[in-house]
Image: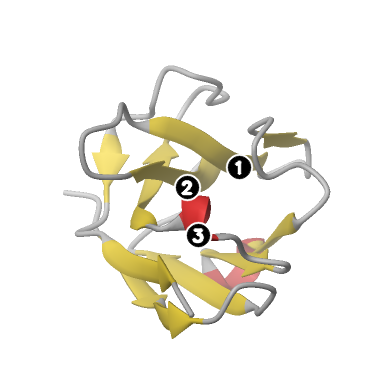
Amino acid sequence: QVQLVESGGGVVQPGGSLRLSCVASESLYTMGWFRQAPGKQRELVATVTSGGSKNYGNAVHGRFTISRDNAQNTVVLQMNDLKPEDTAVYYCNADQYRAIAHIPGDYWGQGTQVTVSS
């Protein structure tokens, strides 16, 4: 069974930065992040394939950067210029065989809270 273990998250002021990491128990084709805020639908944040192809959600494009270390089965989300509307639970998501767009992959992490507040 594939396991995804997340770290990072926390509370930050508007305009600040946070970094999320996710380590997978095995090599996976696509790794990335979704988020869900209270009362809102889950949405794509960013994904990256093992070949380096990246996909960003419209709300974060230009502020967030996703990167990946294939040797370590790790994906990192660098979040800059955070806004209150970025407040959500962020979930690591991955799939063994296909790219991830708005349809999530098969595997999920436990989620980590990101709160942007003054």
Give the amino acid type for the residue marked by disc 2 in the picture: Trp
**Tally of numbered discs:** 3
Q: Secondary structure at mark 3?
A: helix
* CB atoms of marks 2 and 3 within 8 Å: no
Q: Is residue 35 visible?
A: yes
Q: How does the figure colour the protein chain or chains? A: secondary structure
Of the numbered discs 2 and 1, the one sitting upstream in the chain is 2
Crowding at mark 3 (Cα within 10 Å: few <14, some 14-19, many 20+): some
* CB atoms of marks 2 and 1 within 8 Å: yes
- Quarter of the figure with residue 66: bottom right
The residue depicted at 28 percent of the width and 40 percent of the height is: 107
Give the amino acid type for the residue marked by disc 1 in the picture: Ala
- Quarter of the figure with residue 15: bottom right
Q: Secondary structure at mark 2?
A: strand
Question: Which of the labelled discs sits on residue 84, or is there none?
Answer: 3
- Residue 20, position as x, y percentages in the image: 50, 72
Of all residues shown, which one is farthest toward the top? Answer: 103
Of the numbered discs 3 and 1, the one sitting upstream in the chain is 1
Which residue matches tag 2?
33
The residue depicted at 19 percent of the width and 59 percent of the height is: 110
Which one is in front, 95 or 66? Answer: 66
Q: Is residue 29 visible?
A: no
- Relative to residue 103, is residue 93 depicted above or below? below
Marks 3 and 1, Cα distance to the nearest angstrom?
Answer: 18 Å
The residue depicted at 33 percent of the width and 63 percent of the height is: 25
Crowding at mark 2 (Cα within 10 Å: few <14, some 14-19, many 20+): many
Depth check, mark 2 against mark 3: the one in front is 3
Crowding at mark 1 (Cα within 10 Å: few <14, some 14-19, many 20+): many
Which residue matches tag 1?
46
